[in-house]
Structures are given as C-alpha cells and as structure tokens.
Amino acid sequence: MVLDVLIIGSGPAGCTAAIYAARANLKVLVVAGFEAGGQLMITSDVENFPGFEHAITGPSLMEQMRKQAMRFGAEFRDEDATAVDFTVRPFKVTSSSGTHEARAVIVATGSTAKWLGLPSETRLRGHGVSACATCDGFFFKEKEVVVIGGGDSAMEEALFLTKYATKVTIIHRRDSFKASKIMAARAQSHPKIAIRWDTTVEELLGETTVTGVRLKNLKTGKVETLACQGYFSAIGHTPNTGLFKGSLHLDEMGYIMQEGAYDTYTSVEGVFVAGDVYDHRYKQAITAAGSGCKAAIDAERWLETQGSH
Ligand code: NDP
C-alpha cells in the first residue's frame, strides 16, 4: 500500500502535520522515532503554548497531540527511520518494520543536545553527567550540580534543578547571557543559583561518578576545582539530519534548507520539512507546530497537483 504522507518524527511539528494531513483524509504514517515525542518529552512545564492557561508538562502535551492525530486515523510507529530514497516515486522510507512507500514525505526529525566533547564527559555519562534535567534531576536531591551554557536551555535546566539540588552553578564562557531577559532574570535572582562568568570546564572529575569539575577563568587564567555531583550540558542542539545527507540540501550547520515556492519545500519536490530540523532561529514548540501545519497543507496541495489525492 502506498501512503499519501509519511511523516518522519513525532515532536510538535510531526504531530501537528499528522493532525492536519489525517484530517484532510490522507493516509498517514508517522515514523515516530525510537524516542517518540521529541524534545518536549524532556521538558518540564510548558508555559508558553497557547491554550493552556496554566502550565502543561511537555510529555502530557505530546501525548495529547499524538492522540489527537490518531483520532483522525494517523498511524504511529515508535521506530527510527534508517534509510530514505527520495530519487524514486513513490518515495521510500525504511524503518525496523520494513520499507514504506509514500507519495509525499514530511521531515520533522528535530534536533538533539550538544556536548562540550570532553572525554570525561563521555566516560561519566549516566553517572552524574546528563543533558536533560527533567529526566535526571530527581537523582540529584540534596546534591550540588553545575549547568553549562548561557542560553534559555541553561536557564531552564538550572531553574528546574533547584527543585532538587541544594546548589546549582551555571558556568558560562562569557560575561553576559544569551538567554531571554525574563529567563536570565529568573535564574540570576534565584537564591539557589550561582553563576561563574567567563569560565569553561576543562575536565570533569571522578572515577566512577562525578565529584567535581576543573574550571578555568578565561579572563584571569585561574584554574580551580568546584565540587559537584551532577553535570548538565545545556549548550545548544544539533539538527537530526544525518539520514538526509546526500538526499536533501543541508546548510553549513546541517539544517535542512528550505527551497522552492513555499516555506516547507525542500530541494526535492514532494519532500517537505517542519520544525527544529530546519528552524534554528525560533525553535519553539508553537513554531514547530505551526510549521507542521504548513507542511501538511503544502503536502496536501502538492498531492492534488499530482492527481493522487
Ligand atoms: P543557544 O544556542 O541559544 O545557547 C547555547 C549556549 O551555550 C550559549 O550561551 C553558548 O555560549 C553556549 N555554548 C555553546 N557552545 C558552547 C561551548 N562549546 N562551550 C561553552 N558554551 C557553549 O541554545 P539553547 O539550547 O539555550 O536555546 C536554543 C533556542 O531554543 C533559543 O532560541 C532559545 O530561546 C530557545 N529555548 C527557549 C526556551 C523557552 O522559551 N522556554 C527554553 C529553551 C530553549 P555563547 O552565549 O557564548 O554563544
């Protein structure tokens, strides 16, 4: 059976695309990913998604979006896409349950967390090292932790960790935050949060679990050790586009490039894009959802021109 629309990814972009495409009576399969739901699955309270007067948790929001898409007939499979062939029509997308054929594809694979790249960071991952406060914060009750970064993610992680940790130190390489003013102000005024400006992590300390970090002040050159039991990397994200190298045009940072008549068109006609995998500016759940809507509408209209709807 040839699908009308195959959606790769199941964050706000993929789920919204699925809602719109399924409601347009198209046959829709979502290859949702082994870690379905995208980045909101590792987010605590979402306060800025319209429609929820009070905060909703990221996982609850994603569960509702997915169920909403399923109500209109979209099928979800919690498998990773492992290969794509966009040189043939119908397009082919392979996952563990087989190779699926689709007249149109929407790529909504999002982005994932970056690491500093220190060997000790890799060695101690899961033993005090994390990139997800929501997932792992609970393990740091009554402990001291550090958060690396100066963007909104770092502020959000640090604020979340104050629920558990006795002290949270934000380590930032410059002397001002990149984060939005409101998030930075919340972090800076929090009694449990300390900030080390102009500072980098040279090494994580500890044999089997994190016991501290070796810090270097970039202005004074001073090196010192800070004791901590948790280390959270919050320095940004990398787009999940490895699967599309050679199939779709990517920009110098690896994000999928928009090409063609409309916002969600890619370098291959009939393959559309939505969410953080091509948006490195806004990166919000609501903007991802909005672009998922656009991608589904673009796919539907394009399919009509192909005489296959
Ligand atoms: P950003 O790219 O905004 O910030 C990354 C931070 O990490 C920067 O402060 C950067 O330093 C620092 N950094 C990057 N690489 C290194 C490195 N190798 N060593 C040390 N520090 C490093 O990423 P975020 O994930 O914070 O945010 C991405 C987007 O998502 C933003 O648009 C943000 O607004 C949004 N967002 C919104 C949230 C919300 O509204 N609730 C929550 C989370 C994210 P420098 O400042 O020097 O460049």
Image: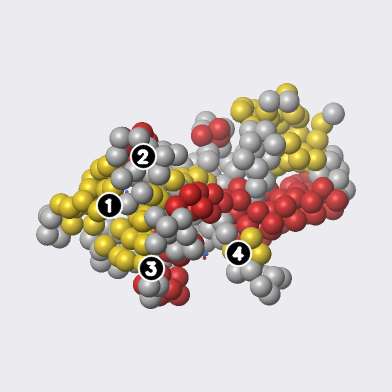
* CB-based contact (under 8 Å), mark 2 and mark 3: no
Q: Nearer the viewer, mark 1 or mark 4?
A: 1
SS state under label 2: loop
Q: Position of residue 221 (x, y in %)?
A: 12, 55
Q: Please name the residue that numbered disc 1 is placed on.
A: 227
Badge 1 crowding class, 10 Å Cα cut-off, few under 14, some 14 to 19, many 20 or more, is some
The CA distance from mark 4 to mark 3 is: 22 Å
- Quarter of the image where one finds residue 191: bottom left
Residue type at the position of mark 3? Lys
Residue type at the position of mark 1? Ala
Report the quarter where the C terminus lies: top right
Kindly identify which numbered label has been placed on residue 46: 4
Q: Residue at x 27, y 42 (%)?
A: 205
Q: Please name the residue that numbered disc 2 is placed on.
A: 209
Q: Is residue 1 left or right of residue 176?
A: right
* CB-based contact (under 8 Å), mark 1 and mark 3: no
Q: Please name the residue that numbered disc 3 is placed on.
A: 192
Q: Position of residue 228 (x, y in %)?
A: 32, 52
Q: Nearer the viewer, mark 4 or mark 3?
A: 3
* CB-based contact (under 8 Å), mark 4 and mark 3: no
Ligand 1 within 8 Å, label 4 CB: yes
- Does residue 97 sit above or below 19 in this rendering? above
Earlier-in-chain disc, 2 versus 1: 2
Ligand 1 within 8 Å, label 1 CB: no
Residue type at the position of mark 4? Val
